[in-house]
Amino acid sequence: MNHLKLVIAEKPSVAQSIAKVLGATKRHDGYTEGNGYLVSWCVGHLVELAAPDAYDQRYKKWTKEDLPILPTEWKYNVSPSTKKQFDILKRLMNRNDVSEIVCATDAGREGELIFRLVYHQCGCKKPFKRLWISSMEDSAIREGFENLRPGSEYDALYEAALCRERADWIVGMNATRFFSVLYGKTLHVGRVVSPTLAMTVMREAEIAAFVPESFYTVNLSLPEMTAVSGRLKEKSDAQDLANVCAQSMALVSKCERKEKSEKAPALYDLTSLQRDANRKLGYTAQQTLDYTQSLYEKKLVTYPRTDSRYLTDDMEEKVPALVNVAAKLAGTAAPAECIVKPVINSKKVSDHHAIIPIMSAERAELAALPVGEREILRLIAARLIAAVAPPYRYAETMAELQCGTGVFTTKGKTVLEAGWKEFEKPGKAETPLPPMNEGDSFPVLFADVKEGKTKPKPHYTEDTLLSAMERAGEDEMPKDAERRGIGTPATRAGIIERLVTRGFLERTGDKKCRNLIPTEKGNALITILPEQLQSASMTADWEEKLLQIERGEYSPEAFMSEIEEMIVSLIENYQVVKDASIIMSNAKKSLGKCPVCGADVGERPKAYSCSNRDCKFALWKNSRYFEAIGKRMTENVAKKLLDNGSVRLKDCYSKRLDKNFSATILLDFDEDGRAQFRMEKGGKS
């Protein structure tokens, strides 16, 4: 009997790349075969945690008395939408000629979970090994198969993944039911989404409470420079100073010139890439992750879900060649001097190194890529070039001048060596000061008073919220803690998207600078949630413990006990917030009028639906029509459809054509009152 190896990837596209390298090119339904291998794939999470009513039918009804629900033995279901592929995997695993299995799902916590759940649900006992790679290059796949690791080496990673999944189930299922029953409205609560929402609500409260204060400065126009006074509270004092200084001389009382240097920026991890893509390109965190994942699967960049900004020691010799590839992608020259040492540090690489282009990207047809992928690829390439370029060197001159009774300051900068900044988009031009020494005098050409106001903290954008999530709780964490913050690089985009999709946050402003603002519904939820479900530091502590579980340094049982104790204490001790009915009623806003019957359309857990129970009109949040073009039925989209009968969408995606496009989606309904959509394409994306 032939002994075959069964390779299980996470997605069909990845399975195809692996199969090509292994020579398993004969196609069957749900897998390929050849050269001693069977190569198949999962389709996301084939196996999912069962709903509460799988444990007891009484849980179909939400009641406070049945809480908390704390399973002692966890149950799983096969997702109905992917049962066909699960059955194919089960049959392949149980074939007599399959002697070994290779787990080739994404090399991270969730990839490990996807494979293991399928493996256990199929009742498989056969030995398995782990493929762990950071690139989809053919050479990386071959090297990975030459160095397969025993599956047991990743048991701790699987334990951490189980703890994450089950903790989210316990908190989400119990807290959502508990608060929904108490307040008579579906309120989605989560272990990581609620603290993230709380951060935005607190920021908006600070902005609302901020009282701006006026201040005044005197600006002196001098030959080839401008000098500014300190802030003055009274306009009259500022005007008096300006009058004294007008047409007089300003004396240089202090002049310092220092040569400074800024080292090149570090390479991208996922969060820093998402932040830059939001700030420079206006992309959401989820868009950036999706574009980068696609580039990874197309063998253009390395694995995206990483929290490292360095490369491993063994990559040092490869970097100059990769920089030449990056220069071609970015449409620029490589730096004359390539300084590799700063980007190399194996000690700062955990599961995966930083995101960089790979050698096969040299043959990429940039024009054929969707615009989002092309822009992200250029961003990643430009960062690799900048990271190995020389430091940016400049001379900074700071001077103080005395005029009348005031002290004025001015600052200038002279670029000595552009260094890495040569490869960044040009910013504001540096302005040098004219030659000067202490004791020199300059005539005041003009003196005027300018009014300013103190400003509150800015609204959160995708960029700054990702940064806040990454740093959450760091003041209360031990200095040697390696993973602080809410969520992981792989999950933060999804956290933000869930808050937007469920109507707790909304994006406002233009495409390049969109703020994340809590809705009335979001504010209402945080108002009634207790501190432990809002606490960023507690969630950051849980994330650190999950990392410790991955390393075998913390007990999974202890972690789960901590989660269960918190939920038990919450249900036993929580007190209903006074006047909550008023808060909740304010959050129950109408999105618009039903186009079928004219009644109000409001939000429900799964849809924006008509308040008239006899009417079948609903805009489903998981609309297949919208998902097919890479979009979601958000509250903002639903409102535009109701108000205008249409919505204009940019960056839609055609899987068949593998490109982005813009379109207007028109709303209609059938004879039963069910929503229907049709598309008018056009415009540049």
Image (tube, rainbow, N blue to C red):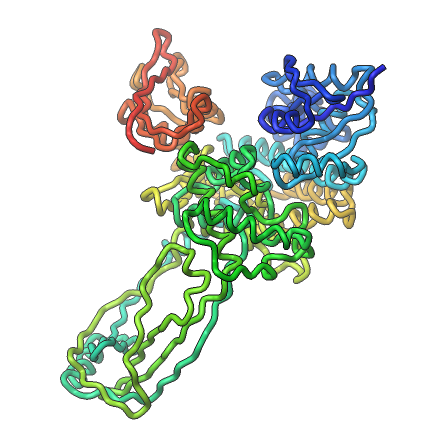
Q: Viewed as shown, does residue 295 lie left or right of 158?
A: left
Residue found at the very far top of the displayed protein: 671
- Residue 257 percent location from the top left of the image: 39, 81
**Position of the N terminus by quadrant:** top right
Q: Is residue 317 above or below residue 149?
A: below
Q: Nearer the viewer, residue 55 or 37?
A: 37
Q: Is residue 89 visible?
A: yes
Displayed quadrant of residue 25:
top right
Q: Quadrant of the C terminus?
A: top left
In this view, the residue in front, 490 or 417, is 417
Q: Is residue 200 visible?
A: no
Residue drawn at (74%, 28%) of the image: 74
Direction from residue 502 to residue 54 in the image, left or right: right
Which residue: 49% across, 30% down? 185
Left or right: residue 76 versus residue 663 is: right
Report the number of numbered marks: 0
Image point (40%, 36%), residue name: 371
Q: Nearer the viewer, residue 294 or 49?
A: 294
**Residue 324 drawn at (x, y percent):** 51, 50
Q: Position of residue 310 (x, y in %)?
A: 61, 54
Q: Is 120 placed above or below 380 here?
A: above
Residue nearest the viewer, comparing 537 with 564 = 537
Image quadrant where residue 647 sits: top left
Please tell me in which quadrant of the rendered image residue 149 appears: top right
Give coordinates of residue 378: x percent, y percent.
Answer: 44, 45
